[in-house]
């Protein structure tokens, strides 16, 4: 079942207030002297005030031992809903090279890094297919399990405007164990796309696809052929990034629309313990880079 789903995917290309309360309570409970002890009228209030002041002075150094100041175990932060690139604030790493829609700059300077867009010769001759023997076991994980496994929020925070997530609420991801109980497949899939006419095939539909795995580049159903050496990096992270031109199609046999090619951008890297394979279908170069940088 999972192999069929995977093949189908391949084919789609707080404390100060408490301290005051405790101190005042302690003062209120301080032993009161007997009336017969005081010979001078008005001495009792003065001495009682001095006692309270001494008590406060003794208690203040103990603030650092209060429970709320003890270290707590950090919790895994939940995944946040990505923002549209057009509404998200300008922050983080910035693109410094001027970019124009419809063109692909071979080199893009960043405020902390540089990206070299290597052109691909296309797909390899044979696309690999994941195969698991009969002794393997599949298990369904919800998003909380995926988040706990990877250890932190991992999806990009900025998504191109107009793209909506294809993961429905309550969707699950499939992991695979071998006969020894070892996790042999932990690739998780996410997709956003332009949902205009969602029930129809639209050959020029804009799409963003992201695959993630723990501590490694996700296993792929197909390999793109890139001949040049990777020299790109973001911050201190090496990033492989490239593109190829895909033909539109199949197109309408009468109108022959759409015709021509569209760019397919690809990026692969491992950051903060998570491996990424990101694809941008029919996106602009700026849209793709902005999504990429929002991971960091």
Image: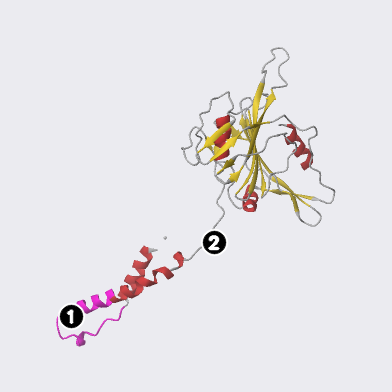
Q: Which residues are magenta?
A: 30-53
Q: Is 41 drawn above or below residue 181 in the view shown?
A: below
The one nearer the camera, 84 or 14, is 84
Helix, strand or loop status at disc 2: loop
Query: Which residue is tagged 1?
Result: 43
Q: Is 18 drawn above or below residue 238 in the view shown?
A: below
The one nearer the camera, 103 or 116, is 116
Disc 2 and disc 1: Cα gap in Å?
51 Å
Q: Residue furthest right?
A: 134
Q: Is 243 drawn above or below residue 69 in the view shown?
A: above
Helix, strand or loop status at disc 1: helix
Residue at 59 percent across and 41 percent down: it is: 233
Location of the N terminus by quadrant is top right
- Residue 158's image quarter? top right
Residue 43 within the segment the image draws in magenta: yes
Location of the C terminus by quadrant is top right
- Neighbour tally class for label 1: few under 14, some 14-19, many 20 plus, Cα within 10 Å: few
Query: Which residue is tagged 2?
Result: 73
Residue 55 in the image, given as x and y percentages of width and height: 31, 76
| Disc nearer the start of the sequence (2/1) | 1
Residue 110 in the image, given as x and y percentages of width and height: 52, 37
Note whether residue 275 is visible.
yes
Residue 246 in the image, given as x and y percentages of width and height: 69, 25
Residue 144 in the image, given as x and y percentages of width and height: 62, 50
């Amino acid at each position: 079942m999972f192999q069929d789903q995977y093949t189908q995917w391949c084919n789609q290309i707080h404390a100060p207030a408490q301290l005051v309360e405790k101190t005042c309570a302690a003062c209120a409970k301080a032993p009161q002297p007997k009336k017969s002890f005081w010979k001078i009228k008005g001495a009792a209030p003065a001495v009682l005030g001095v006692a309270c002041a001494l008590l406060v002075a003794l208690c203040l150094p103990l603030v650092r031992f209060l429970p709320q100041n003890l270290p707590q175990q950090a919790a895994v932060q939940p995944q946040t809903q990505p923002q549209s690139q057009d509404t998200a604030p300008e922050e983080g790493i910035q693109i410094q090279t001027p970019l124009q829609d419809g063109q692909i700059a071979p080199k893009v300077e960043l405020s902390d890094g540089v990206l070299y867009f290597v052109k691909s010769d296309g797909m390899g001759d044979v696309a690999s297919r994941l195969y698991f023997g009969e002794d393997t076991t599949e298990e369904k994980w919800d998003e909380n399990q995926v988040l706990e496994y990877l250890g932190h929020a991992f999806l990009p925070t900025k998504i191109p405007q107009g793209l909506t997530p294809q993961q429905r609420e309550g969707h699950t991801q499939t992991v695979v164990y071998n006969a020894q109980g070892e996790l042999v497949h932990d690739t998780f899939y996410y997709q956003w796309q332009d949902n205009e006419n969602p029930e129809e095939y639209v050959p020029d539909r804009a799409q963003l696809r992201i695959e993630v795995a723990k501590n490694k580049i996700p296993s792929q159903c197909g390999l793109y052929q890139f001949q040049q050496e990777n020299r790109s990096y973001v911050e201190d992270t090496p990033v492989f990034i490239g593109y190829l031109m895909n033909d539109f199609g199949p197109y309408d046999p009468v109108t022959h629309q759409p015709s021509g090619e569209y760019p397919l951008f690809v990026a692969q890297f491992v950051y903060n313990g998570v491996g990424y394979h990101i694809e941008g279908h029919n996106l602009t170069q700026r849209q793709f880079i902005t999504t990429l940088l929002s991971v960091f």
